[in-house]
Image: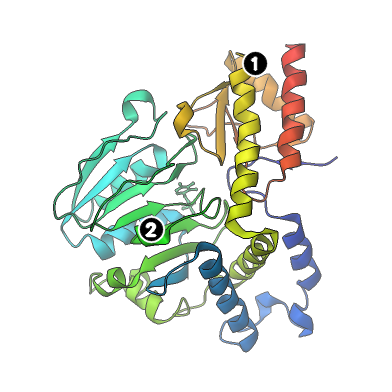
Amino acid sequence: MKKHNFYAGPAILPQEVLEKAKAELTSLNGIGLSVMEISHRSKDFDAIITSAEENFKKLLNIPDNYHVLFLQGGASQQFGMIPMNLLKGGTADYVNTGAWAKKAIKEAKLFGDVNVVASSEDKDFSYIPKEFNFTDGCEYVHITSNETIGGIQFNDFPDTGDIPLIADMSSDIMSKKLDISKFGLIYAGAQKNIGPSGVTLVIIRDDLVKNSADGITTMLSYKTHAEKKSLYNTPPSFGIYIIKLVTDWLIELGGLDEIEKINAEKAGLLYDKFDSDDFYNGTANKEDRSKMNVTFRLQSEELEKKFIEEATAAGFIGLKGHRSVGGCRASIYNALPLESVQELIKFMDEFEKNN
Ligand SMILES: *Cc1c(COP(=O)(O)O)cnc(C)c1O
């Protein structure tokens, strides 16, 4: 039976990418060795990491004064690495939009003063705050562009003027066009929209690298990784290889213009369904609905349990909401085909009729 993969992360990868990786698993480009068995300083791996970096620059139109880094430790490590490098005992502004923002705030407090300048906690994180009063002279402003658990997403980014804007884009990077020049730093764990777990993408403006704190342990310093182009130590080479294939796939598909349209169509199908009757109810404020993680509830927890069980049996995998909030969630990342959403809607119609 065909499986439709709605997991929040690690998440679906393009089928074409898995096929290509399978074909090349034991012999990369006919060299007789797997990508997992070669030196990260070999010319074959150099071609891969260079091409992955070039692909990001092309897809996201990244200006020359930014570094594209492939790090480890997940997005969670960036929660600490950012203030460790950039806060330097000063003040940083954070926008609290949910579970992930909270974790980032907790780490930042270890390294300086944190002002939570806006929060949607008053309404269970069902919306994106729109009013901000940034602190004069703060080191940076941190936002979570898409809250994977709550299912809310920034449509417009706050204008922070000269203050560097930093965004955790783990669950919506590359899902739509983006003006990189508005940001000082963007980071994302790979396992939602760009590859397998084990790689963390960091896009950082050069002046932030230059001004970052000295005297930090080598592996947690942006200076180290920018200077050595992600090759200070052994990078997660297989993950970077898969990311190269995923970005090749995205370029082939037509880039961010094209994927943005497809993603809007997929999300639109589900949200239209919620709006057309009262059986399934979206949890996010309409104008802040995520196009990557669609969160919804049924009338009772028993009915939700039944829905998830029957959906799973019918091949729709990963629809259970995050354990911290319950309910249901359909994660519809770049690699999820439109057809999977269309099939899910059919299943939802059928379930509604029978219940
Ligand atoms: C998944 C996720 C994280 C955590 O990522 P790890 O790579 O597991 O550390 C952080 N922020 C957001 C928005 C996420 O979706």
Q: Quadrant of residue 279?
A: top right
Whether residue 196 can be seen here: no
Assign a secondary structure to mark 2: helix
In this picture, is 44 found above or below 275?
below
> Is 153 displayed left or right of 162 in the figure?
right
**Residue tagged 2:** 78
Q: Position of residue 233 (x, y in %)?
A: 47, 78
Can residue 151 be spotted in the picture? yes
Q: Earlier in the sequence, mark 2 or mark 1?
A: 2
Residue 136, x across and y down, in percent: 14, 51
Q: Residue at x 77, y 12 (%)?
A: 354
Image location (x, y in percent) of residue 76? 42, 53
Foreground: 170 or 79? 170
The residue that label 1 is drawn on is 303
Q: Tell me how many marks there are.
A: 2
Residue type beneath disc 1: Leu
Quadrant of the frame with the C terminus: top right
Residue 181: quadrant of the picture = bottom left
Relative height, residue 58 to residue 354 (above, below): below
Q: Residue at x 62, y 51 (%)?
A: 259
Q: Position of residue 175 (x, y in %)?
A: 56, 50
Tell me if residue 182 comes above or below residue 25 in the rendering.
above
Q: Residues within 10 Å of mark 2 (few under 14, many from 20)?
A: many
- What kind of residue is marked 2? Gln
Q: Is residue 174 left or right of residue 318?
A: left
| Quarter location, residue 147 | top left
Residue for point 37% across, 46% down: 157
Is ligand 1 less than 8 Å from the beta carbon at label 2? yes
* Helix, strand or loop status at disc 1: helix
CB contact under 8 Å: marks 2 and 1: no
